[in-house]
Amino acid sequence: MESKISVKNLDFFYGSNQALYDISLDIPEREVIAFIGPSGCGKSTFLRTLNRMNDTIASASVKGSVMMDGKNIYASGTDVVALRRRVGMVFQKSNPFPKSIFENVAYGIRINGIHSNKADLEERVERALKNAALWEEVKDRLNSSAFGLSGGQQQRLCIARALAVQPEVILMDEPASALDPIATQKIEELVVELKRDYTIVIVTHNMQQAARVSDRTAFFMLGKLVEFNPTQKMFTNPDEKLTEDYITGRFG
Amino acid sequence: MSETATTFERKRRGINLLMTSLTAVCAVFTIAVLVAILGYIGVRGISSLSIEFLTDTPKPVGEGGGIGNSILGSAIMTLLAAFIGLPVGIAAGVYLAEFGKNWFGNTVRFVADTLIGVPSIIIGIFVYTLVVLPMGRQSGFAGGLALAIIMIPIVARTTEEMIGLVPHSMREGALALGAPQWRVTWNIVLPAAASGIATGAMLAIARVTGETAPLLFTALNSRFYNYYLDQPMSSLTVQIFNYATGPFEVEHAMAWAATLLLVTLILVINILVRFFTRKRF
């Protein structure tokens, strides 16, 4: 099995508080991996170690390694900016920029200098919006503010924005937690669709969502990785009693 | 039991009424003072206002004269102050907000806060020593510089506060796309904070428009229309000071009229600020 990301013995600290304990897991290419677990279990923290987003927190520190395509992203001299271009991220709360819909998607393309000319830029924006299943809804108002979109549309805009820079991995931090069932369904269909081209890691509180979209599921608790198995097995015959208790809702 | 409760309750209501009345009286007093000042300035000043007064230069007592050159001088020096003070102040504010969470940032913050509290006449003396003495004369440049120095800490602190209001999630969104820090600040954070920063800038401009003391030492005054920054320059505030301290009644009347104009200008700037900030809420 070819691993896109391989995490070895990862410890994570907020100051002197340890948030993650000795996490090791392999994420295969072009699969959807779901992280589940109770609030505060460290799944979001772990997700954010994969694109070093935790670097923005001054007190954070990391031990262990995260290998991506065989290279440790925590090695000194790693270009974090280049890493984040390869590992895109969609956040729990949609966070469009105070710009037009078009400029939101174009932003990543512009700053990374991906486009060759204006026509190319427009084509890339259109493609990203189509891939995020948003094009039909916004094609007539590309120049209006992104804040005028509904919550679900804003979240798909953020996905389009992430897709536009053509990352290899997409991290999603509870992308549908603030959305209604219809918008959620659209995001889920999208995740399954995107799997063809991208490796996707998705944090979710919704067990059914994990079961529906993911190939593999990792269950976290109290900063530890309890179990990591194919989703099918996780939800039918988990190795750990703790996993079964959590998934079936038998939890004290 | 029930009787003590009523006594207690009556006492509580009594204190409540007393405190509410006290604060209301203080509020009315504050407004009354403001209205009295504005009203008095209006009554005393309006009669001397005329086109001639607004365009003419000062003349010997009894021959009329106006404050045209003072208006021009105030405009030039305020613009110069804004030209120097705004970029420096805004840049310093950006530094404090985005990169200033360290001992150096804390030092700058402390110094800026202290500088805001320094009486403006001291800034005037500072520029007098720094620019006026070596140049050998007062000048519009020295005046503008003094005003700029007053503006910088105000603008820096308001800019920092406004940038602090930009949600962290917006920065993370840009960082996650592979944007380097400076681009996040330049393309995302600054535009998002722009209206707030502009508000701070206009308030700082309004503040220095009303400064007199630093200009006495630095720009002095002039009886002529002066377009040259290396020459002494008139300003509304210093001209008001001169007219008001003069011995003649006509001069006092002109001081009132100029005061009315100055207060109106500052009021207009404040109203503009209100107008631009209201949009956001």
Image (spheres, grey):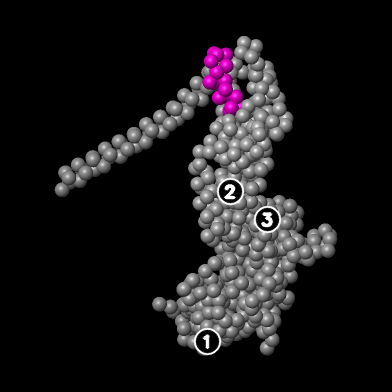
Horizontal and vertical percent position of residue A12: 53, 76
User: Are discs 1 and 3 located on one and the same chain?
Assistant: no
Position above or below: A45 against B174: below
Mark 3 is on which residue type? Trp
Q: Main secondary structure of the magenta part?
A: helix
Q: Is residue B245 magenta?
A: yes
Q: Are marks 3 and 2 in contact (CB under 8 Å)?
A: no
Residue picked out by circle 3: B186
Camera-side residue of B252 and A74? B252
Which residue is rendered at x = 68% and y = 77% of the image?
A199
Range of magenta residues: B236-251
Q: Chain of mark 2?
A: B
Visible residue check, residue A169: yes
The image's mark for residue B156 is 2
Mark 3 or mark 2: name the one nearer the start of the chain.
2
In the rendered image, the quadrant that contains the C terminus of chain B is: top right
Badge 2 local density, few (<14 within 10 Å), some, or many (20+)?
Answer: many
Q: Is residue A127 magenta?
A: no
Residue picked out by circle 1: A238
Q: Chain of mark 1?
A: A
Horizontal and vertical percent position of residue A14: 50, 71
Question: Seen in the image, is B275 located left or right of residue A198?
Answer: left
Which residue is rendered at x = 47% and y = 86% of the image?
A241
Question: Which element is circle 2 on?
Answer: helix
Mark 1 is on which residue type? Pro
